[in-house]
């Protein structure tokens, strides 16, 4: 009996030792994050963390998500990207066209995952969507058809719409391409586009106030990481001038924005986690196709419409995927 107990004790000790060794040998992966904003992106970081956790990557155990390179403005992205590349993470995850371009300029070897509204082929980041060929892959939310759809929704809100203010960061290659898409769609609908440049958070309020002085019937807000991280400020300022506005990210509607038609960004983040898992296990980013969204969401904030004195057509409400009342 004692002999049997001794054997069991030895086996148990060996099992514990093996588990300890395995734990000690488990690799800790480091992923660097590069985009504009920290506080306004907390919910996105939570989605990314949870998605990675479901795949077995847990912070404090086998994962480090390096947030040191999240910045508060476009002008800081190049320096942050260079420092991030010098720190040699296994993988870089970016949000926004300007951020992925900065990361790609900083390194041609470290894998980069992007979530961007830009066309990666036109931006010089990939040979094609199906086979990128370089060190960049991920998700692109670019879709020229979205421009026409958003203008149609604005026309439904404002039947006699003739002129629209388009708010963007004009130095962003991807946002300039979005503006061109809107201009092409506007010609077909007989609508004039009036670009309004916003380059930093402190210029959001003055820019929107200036729109109130323009002879425009509505506002189009191009998808932008700067605007998204400051979406509450954006929606509050637009509400002050009481002009119908449509956004390129449905999260604006949750904080008081009027209407949005866009892919679900949260789905894109979950796809990035899956790609991160593949790359950390040895896949080459250049061989992973850049994905495009397959589903879109129309979100309407009736409460905001009532506060601003804007009537939402019943036909639009019936088509909405999500209505905030």
Image (tube, helix red, strand yellow):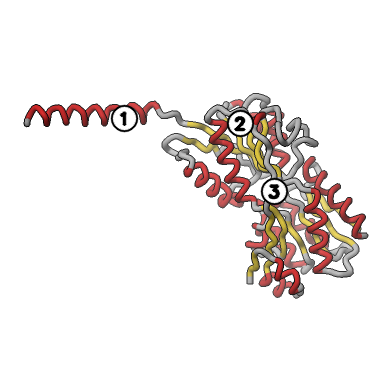
Q: Are marks 2 and 1 in contact (CB under 8 Å)?
A: no
Q: Residue at x 75, y 42 (%)?
A: 118
Question: Quarter of the image containing the N terminus?
Answer: top left
Disc number at residue 220? none
Q: Is residue 310 visible?
A: no
Where, by quadrant of the figure, is residue 130 drawn? top right
In the displayed structure, 243 sits above or below 287; it is: below
Which quarter shows the C terminus?
Answer: bottom right
Q: Which residue sits at x=56%, y=33%?
A: 278
In the foreground, 46 or 226: 46
Q: In what element is the residue under mark 2?
A: helix
First of labels 1, 3 by sequence position: 1
Residue assigned mark 3? 226
Quarter location, residue 174: top right
Residue located beneath label 1 in the image: 20
First in sequence, mark 3 or 2: give its number: 2
The percent position of residue 40, horizontal first and vertical second, equals 61, 52
- The residue depicted at 90 percent of the width and 59 percent of the height is 189
**Residue 13 visible in rendering:** yes
Give the spatial CA distance, label 1 vs label 3: 45 Å
Q: Nearer the viewer, mark 2 or mark 1?
A: 1
Q: Is residue 208 above or below residue 72?
A: below
Mark 3 falls on what kind of element?
helix
Structural crowding at the residue carrying mark 1, measured as other residues with C-alpha within 10 Å and reported as few (<14), some (14–19) or many (≥20):
few
Q: Nearer the viewer, residue 257 or 259?
A: 259
Q: Residue at x 71, y 55 (%)?
A: 262
Instruction: For marks 3 and 2, give the CA distance.
Output: 20 Å
Q: CA distance from mark 2 to mark 1?
A: 32 Å
> Which numbered disc covers residue 84?
2
The tally of labels here is 3
Callout in the foreground (1, 3): 1
């Amino acid at each position: 009996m004692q002999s049997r107990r001794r054997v069991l004790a030895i086996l148990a000790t060996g099992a514990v030792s093996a588990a300890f060794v395995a734990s000690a040998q488990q690799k800790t992966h480091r992923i660097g994050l590069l985009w504009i904003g920290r506080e306004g992106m907390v919910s996105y970081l939570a989605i990314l963390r949870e998605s990675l956790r479901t795949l077995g990557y847990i912070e404090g155990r086998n994962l480090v998500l390096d947030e040191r390179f999240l910045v508060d403005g476009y002008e800081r992205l190049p320096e942050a990207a260079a420092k991030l590349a010098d720190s040699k993470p296994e993988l870089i995850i970016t949000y926004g066209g300007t951020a992925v371009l900065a990361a790609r300029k900083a390194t041609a070897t470290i894998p980069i995952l992007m979530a961007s509204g830009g066309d990666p082929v036109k931006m010089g980041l990939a040979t094609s969507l199906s086979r990128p060929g370089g060190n960049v892959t991920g998700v692109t939310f670019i879709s020229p058809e979205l421009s026409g759809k958003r203008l149609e929704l604005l026309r439904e809100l404002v039947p006699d719409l003739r002129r629209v203010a388009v708010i963007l960061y004009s130095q962003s290659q991807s946002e300039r391409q979005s503006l061109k898409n809107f201009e092409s769609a506007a010609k077909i609908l007989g609508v004039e586009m009036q670009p309004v440049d916003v380059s930093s958070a402190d210029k959001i309020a003055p820019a929107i106030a200036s729109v109130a002085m323009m002879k425009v019937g509505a506002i189009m807000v191009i998808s932008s990481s700067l605007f998204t991280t400051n979406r509450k400020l954006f929606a509050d300022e637009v509400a002050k001038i009481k002009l119908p506005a449509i956004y390129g990210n449905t999260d604006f509607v949750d904080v008081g924005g009027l209407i949005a038609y866009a892919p679900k960004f949260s789905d894109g983040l979950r796809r990035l986690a899956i790609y991160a898992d593949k790359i950390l296990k040895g896949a080459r980013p250049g061989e992973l196709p850049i994905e495009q969204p397959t589903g879109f969401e129309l979100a309407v904030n009736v409460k905001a419409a009532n506060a601003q004195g804007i009537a939402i057509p019943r036909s639009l409400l019936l088509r909405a995927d999500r209505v905030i009342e």
